[in-house]
Amino acid sequence: MIAQQQPSSPPLIQAEGVTRIFGRGSSAVHALRGASFSIPAKRLIALRGRSGSGKTTLINILGALDKPTEGHVFFNGNEISSFSEKKRNALRRKEMGLIFQSFGLVPLMTAYENVEFGLRIAGVKSVHFKNYAENALDYVGLKARMKHRPFEMSGGEQQRVAIARAIAHKPALILADEPTAELDSKMGAQVMRVFKDLVQNEGMTIILTTHDPAIMSFADHVYALEDGQIVDAT
């Protein structure tokens, strides 16, 4: 069931009639077809659907990595779909954290250096680097391994470093595209427990894509996408 908002508590992020078309004419691909939903703060949301359903395209638009062909996206009441590229970049750096299934860590950097690099990109003052980075790594249970490089870590540990990098600057919204796809079920559950804790204890909102029923069981709400449309919500 789609969560209802009180008038005094607007949604953190909202999509209204979001359509995304790639290409033109007979070769045009409709990745999204009028997707609409409203997500309150402090929720763990899953987007499910088979490959090509529009999940990743929707995540990219919600994260200001792409703009809709039609429709509107609002974040904290501001229509970010109309922002310039510069404003979208600034919003993403300061208010959002992005996590991908490929981890995206810099191979020659230690876990600490990877998280600190994220803080630099987010524009955090250097005086906070050590405290923020160590706290984030401690939060995901990796403070003791912060001097290790990615090749010295398991897949689950690398994904937890990616999570630490995404949360270190304390964003309001985390967007994760298939964050457990490369992990076994045990490691996937471990990552999801970290996500649940971030929502419940840190007040973050997390939207992730998945096709794994076990992962969906951790979510507060699940939205199903089919052919670029939201067809179900539970």
Image (cartoon, grey):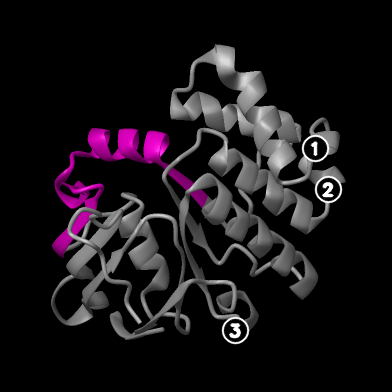
Q: Are marks 2 and 1 in contact (CB under 8 Å)?
A: yes
**Mark 1 residue type:** Arg
Residue 183 counted in the magenta span: no
Q: What separation in Å lies between label 2 and label 1 (alpha carbons)? A: 7 Å
Residue drawn 16% across the image and 60% down it? 72
In the picture shown, does residue 84 fall above or below 205? above
Label at residue 213: 3
Q: Nearer the viewer, mark 1 or mark 3?
A: 3
The residue singled out by tag 2 in the image is 153
Is 152 on the left or on the right of 207, as rendered? right
Could you tell me if residue 108 is visible in this image? no
Q: Earlier in the sequence, mark 3 or mark 2?
A: 2
Quadrant where the N terminus sits is: bottom left
Residue drawn 49% across the image and 16% down it? 125
Residue drawn 82% across the image and 45% down it? 151
Q: Name the spot of residue 198 as percent of width and height, x first.
A: 57, 51
In the picture shown, does residue 85 fall above or below 62? above
Could you tell me if residue 157 is visible in this image? yes
In the picture shown, does residue 38 fall above or below 90? below
Front one among 4 and 82: 4
Q: Name the spot of residue 199 as percent of width and height, x first.
A: 52, 55
The residue singled out by tag 1 in the image is 149
**Mark 3 residue type:** Pro
* Residues rendered magenta in the picture: 70-98
Residue drawn 62% across the image and 48% down it? 163
